[in-house]
Image: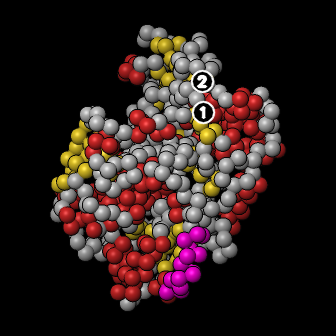
Amino acid sequence: MRPVSQSPLKLSRFDRSCLQGDEGPACRFAMTLITEVARATAASRLIDISQAHLVGSYDSGPANVKFLDLMLEQGAKVRVPTSLNASSACVESGSPSAAQDVRRARDVIRRYETMGCTPTLTCAPYHLSSLPRKGEVIAWAESNAIVYANSVIGARTNKTMQYLDFCAAITGRIPACGLYLDDQRLATVHIDCSGISVDRWSESLSWQLLGLLTGTLAGSAVPVLTGMADRATADDLRALGSGAASTGNVAMFHAVGLTAEAPDLESATGGRPVTTRFEVGDRELDTLENQYGAAPGTPISAICLGTPHFSFAEFQQLQAEFADAGQVCVIPFYVTTSRHVRDQLDRHGYSESLVKSGVRVLTDSCSYYGRVVPGLSGTVMTNSAKWAYYASGNLGIKSSLSSLSDCVASAISGQVERRTVAQS
Amino acid sequence: MRAIELEVLVSGEASGPLLKLRESISFWGGLDPASGKIIDVQHPDEGQCIRDTILLLPGIRGSTAAPGALLECIHAGCGPSALILAESDPTPMVAVLVAQHIGLKAFPVYSLRHAGDMNSFKSGRQVVIRDGWLS
């Protein structure tokens, strides 16, 4: 039988000693899995990673627990700083999740902690003090974090899948393929956004919608976007990436003048011609806005924000919206975030005023996983393209995507408010 | 149908009815691991069951948690007899290696040597995979 890779995989002395079992049976298995993936992806060597972010910190079932138990028994320990993604339940005291779900999630998290992982329980590891630097080689799972790391920070990671992430953390090694290689980071698809009106760039919803559109147009390719605003917030760029990773397989994008490796178009493409070029404008955004937004007046059962986990800046905006409105929610209003950002809220005294407005801040998990928060039915409103894209399938509800200020207005009235309805 | 050469990702032999998916799939959220049924309402093959089939798919998309869903599917005895990818992707291989590590019997994984061969297949047909050839 022919191996997929024709070029032989070069292994270091350490890689070989892991394969021989010198580092213990858990490390032998981890290195075997890594080298198999290296062969399947035609990587010629393995490289060191400085940190890992694992997606498997939720309860995915009994086989997963069996595997973790076996790895523990075989002496598994992570070799690099390793953070954990959001879990299948909110595991802090006062959690709205079912007791059984909390217990199972805690069981999985505890096993990872025993192996040396830090229970960060967030899908936004770039909000932590451990965020990587430009050029750093990391192994992150969780699609939005991957796009953010590659595009906004300029760190290097592939879309590391579950178990490969864990094996990379155990060995500190990863196959050198895909976005670890310079030429694979260059854009092959060009999305010209100059048809989008200048005033739209100040609305965060535009970035969410452009993300959905970018994923559809780019698929698995690295796109470069031009003709955008000359300034963007970190939240704008992550909205774009998170949406693109939902509708497409996008693991990196360039936005000229805005992202880490795109000071100009030539840097983003490496001076090579792109395979496809698209032009997008207000009309495309309007179409998506109407497709993802329910009609004004539609009754809603809840508001869900924080997919990916809400940033401190987003909380500041949310608090300002409620302060301006001077009214409180008549329906449940959930915002998911990391403990790290929640502690920041506490320190700045925001938590109390959010509670008074009727906002419930949840940590450790995400409201679009089934059963995390109770009472979601009918139509649920969000400002997150990723939530809107996945929640209907995961939860069997209808989602309505709108701006943050529309979400606040709708929470106060109990029905969909859209202050600016796009022309269809 | 002429015999088609496959790239071997996880070796093994298999036979059974072919199930060809019309679009790539996200195993996490798109597959019910307890039954092997495709539950993604946006997928054209929603409702089909991958259990004991020779599963041919154009690609894998979506969540990085896909190996976890496939692993549980194998553990529940609802996995396919073999899996063939139009484009090489390590996702199923990772699930199979983890399954084997905990003593589960898993399935062989292949990719098409020529992605265009995808068009030569129709669902429902009985096929055999032996020595890296599909016939």
The image shows residue A95 at horizontal and vertical percentages of 63, 72
Quadrant of the image containing the N terminus of chain A: top right
- Give the farthest residue toward the top: B2
Q: Are marks 1 and 2 in contact (CB under 8 Å)?
A: yes
Mark 1 lies on a secondary structure that is strand
Which range is magenta? Answer: A339-353
Residue occupied by mark 2: A9
* Residue displayed at 31% across by 58% down: A209
Identify the residue position indicated by label 1 in the image: A46
Chain letter belonging to callout 2: A
Residue at position x 42%, y 54% from top? Answer: A152
Magenta stretch: residue B101 in it?
Answer: no
Looking at the picture, which amino acid does disc 2 mark? Answer: Leu
Q: Residues within 10 Å of mark 1 (few under 14, many from 20)?
A: many
Q: Is residue A201 above or below residue A8?
A: below
Distance in Å between CA atoms under marks 1 and 2: 8 Å
Queried whether the magenta region covers residue A347, the answer comes back as yes
Q: Residue furthest bottom?
A: A326
Residue A270 visible? The answer is: yes
Where residue A97 sits, quadrant-wise, is bottom right
Question: Residue A293 vs residue A301: left or right?
Answer: left
Q: Nearer the viewer, residue A49 or A308?
A: A49
Magenta span: chief secondary structure: helix
Secondary element at image label 2: loop
The answer to whether residue B29 of the structure is visible from this angle is no
Say left or right for A172 vs A358. Answer: right
Q: Amino acid at mark 1?
A: Leu
Give x and y (percent) for residue A373.
Answer: 55, 68
Q: Which x, y percent locates residue A137?
A: 55, 45
Viewer-proximal residue among B26 and A41 = A41
